[in-house]
Each structure stands twice: as C-alpha cells, then as structure tokens.
C-alpha cells in the first residue's frame, strides 16, 4: 500500500480514500463485477477476490445466493448467474459505493497532508483578496485626496474673485475671517456677512457653479450674483442650500449658454 501511495504522490496526487475495489460491491448475495480485465468477487461473504473465468467453477458452490453479475453483454459468460446487469460507467458506479476505509495509522497522516494541500488554493485566494482590498484602499485614498485638492482649488478661486486685492493667499480661512471682522460695521460687513452665509452652499457645488458677477445693494441690503452652472438641477440645489442656510432667495429666469446655464440669484434683503 505504501508503494501505491508513493506512486500516486509521484504522479502529483494524494489518495482521498484507500479501499479495496472488490469491497465496494453491494453486500447482497454474491456480486461479480467485470473490471479492468478481471472479475471482482464480493457481497455478503467475507472473501474479496480478483479472479479469471476459469476460477469461477471452483468457487461458485461456496458463494451465497443469489448470484449477481455485472458486465458488458459480451462478458456475460459465467455459468449459474441468477441476474446479469450492464454498467455504462463501471468505475463511476463502483466509486459510488463505500467499503472498509484503509487510510488509517500512517496513511491517515498522509490524508491530513492532503487536506493541507487543499488549503493552499484557499490561502492563495485569501492573499489575492488582501492585495485587491489594499489596492482598493489606495485608489480610494488617491481619489479622496484628488477631490480635496479640487475643493481647495475651488475655494481659492472663489476667494480671489471676492477679494482680488489680496495678492498673497497664505491661510484662506484666517484671511476670510479678517475681512469679516474688518467690515462688520459697514456695507462691506453686510456683504461679507451674506457671503459668509452663502459660502457653504456655493462651495458645496465645488467648481460646478461659478460666480460671474457680484452686485451688492447697501440700500436694499441684498446681494445679486450672476452664476453659471452645468445644468438647471445644479441651480436648484444651490437655491435649496441657500434657503436651508436661512437666507431669502430669489432665483431669476435661467438661460442656456452653450453647454451651461446662466441665472441671476438674489439673496438677502
């Protein structure tokens, strides 16, 4: 048996089970099964043999009844068989039955080694999943960093539109707060207050909504902005965000200019 197991290992496989072929025959009467140029003898009796045609007459009287034969039609030549059957797939039919398991003691250890070999593809799949997940996190991090850079660029562009006199931009938030503090008691303070309230709504759309023109009326206390967006839905989102910020909002009729939409937006007042 060790030689057979070693041969199988040399061929690149380890047996999942070790059983005698004749022991796989059904335990009903006597079973004769033609396989690989010989007859397998099994059944109720304890004997498990491989024999040729000429051996059968010497064994027939000692076999339990009934006598079942399984063979191709041209090999149904044994005398005294009570029932003959053909098997289209003899190896598969035989392997579908169970016999006495011989993979024990030292051979059971080899069986455990086989399970370890089966774990290798599983571990390889787990490793591949880890690599793919790691790649996903890297791609996600790069995407978020890229989006952050876009928002920062949009914030800077908006600030420079509002305060073109500031040639140096060191800390956008701090400089914006300075403008708010400097103009609290003036019309500019009112303007900056409105811009501060509207800033979140404008920046939420990123670079999609662009401010083309600003007009502030100190008398009415409102801020008029000519804005350009890629579509009417972007303008509607901007209006809803301004209302949610507590501002009175009037959205003028929008007109399409090429691939963009332009509209006049009045807040405050």
Image: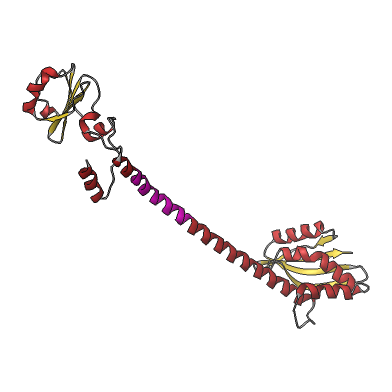
| Magenta region, residue range | 112-129
Q: Is residue 9 left or right of residue 188?
A: left
Q: Residue at x 74, y 73 (%)?
A: 158
Report which quarter residue 96 is drawn in: top left
Frontmost residue, 128 versus 236: 128
Q: Residue at x 24, y 44 (%)?
A: 5
Frontmost residue, 126 versus 212: 126
Colour approach in the figure:
secondary structure
Report which quarter residue 146 is drawn in: bottom right
What type of secondary structure mainly makes up the magenta span? Answer: helix
Q: Which of the image's four quarters has the N terminus?
A: top left
Frontmost residue, 249 versus 9: 9
Residue 131: where, in percent of width, then height? 48, 59
Q: Is residue 254 magenta?
A: no
Residue 46: where, in percent of width, then height? 21, 23
For the question of whether residue 88 can be seen, the reply is no
Residue 17: where, in percent of width, then height? 29, 38
Q: Residue at x 88, y 73 (%)?
A: 181
Residue 247: where, in percent of width, then height? 85, 60
Q: Is residue 161 above or below residue 148?
A: below
Report which quarter residue 251 is drawn in: bottom right
């Amino acid at each position: 048996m060790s030689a057979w197991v070693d041969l199988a290992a040399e061929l690149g496989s380890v047996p999942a089970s070790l059983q005698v072929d004749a022991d796989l025959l059904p335990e009903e009467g006597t079973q004769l099964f033609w396989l690989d140029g010989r007859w397998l003898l099994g059944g109720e009796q304890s004997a498990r043999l491989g024999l040729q045609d000429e051996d059968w007459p010497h064994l027939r009287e000692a076999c339990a009844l009934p006598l079942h034969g399984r063979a191709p039609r041209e090999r149904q030549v044994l005398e005294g068989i009570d029932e003959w059957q053909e098997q289209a797939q003899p190896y598969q039919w035989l392997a579908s039955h169970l016999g006495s398991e011989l993979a024990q003691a030292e051979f059971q250890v080899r069986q455990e080694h086989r399970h370890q070999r089966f774990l290798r593809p599983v571990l390889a799949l787990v490793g591949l999943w880890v690599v793919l997940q790691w790649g996903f996190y890297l791609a996600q991090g790069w995407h978020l960093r890229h989006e952050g850079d876009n928002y920062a660029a949009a914030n800077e562009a908006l600030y420079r539109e509002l305060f073109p006199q500031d040639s140096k931009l060191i800390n956008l938030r701090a400089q914006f707060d300075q403008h708010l503090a400097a103009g609290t008691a003036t019309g500019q303070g009112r303007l900056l207050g409105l811009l501060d309230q509207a800033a979140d709504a404008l920046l939420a759309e990123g670079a999609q909504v662009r401010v083309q023109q600003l007009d502030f009326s100190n008398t009415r206390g409102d801020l008029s902005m000519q804005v350009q967006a890629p579509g009417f839905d972007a303008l509607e989102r901007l209006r809803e965000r301004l209302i949610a910020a507590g501002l009175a909002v009037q959205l003028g009729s929008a007109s399409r200019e090429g691939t963009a939409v332009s509209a006049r937006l009045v807040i405050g007042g």
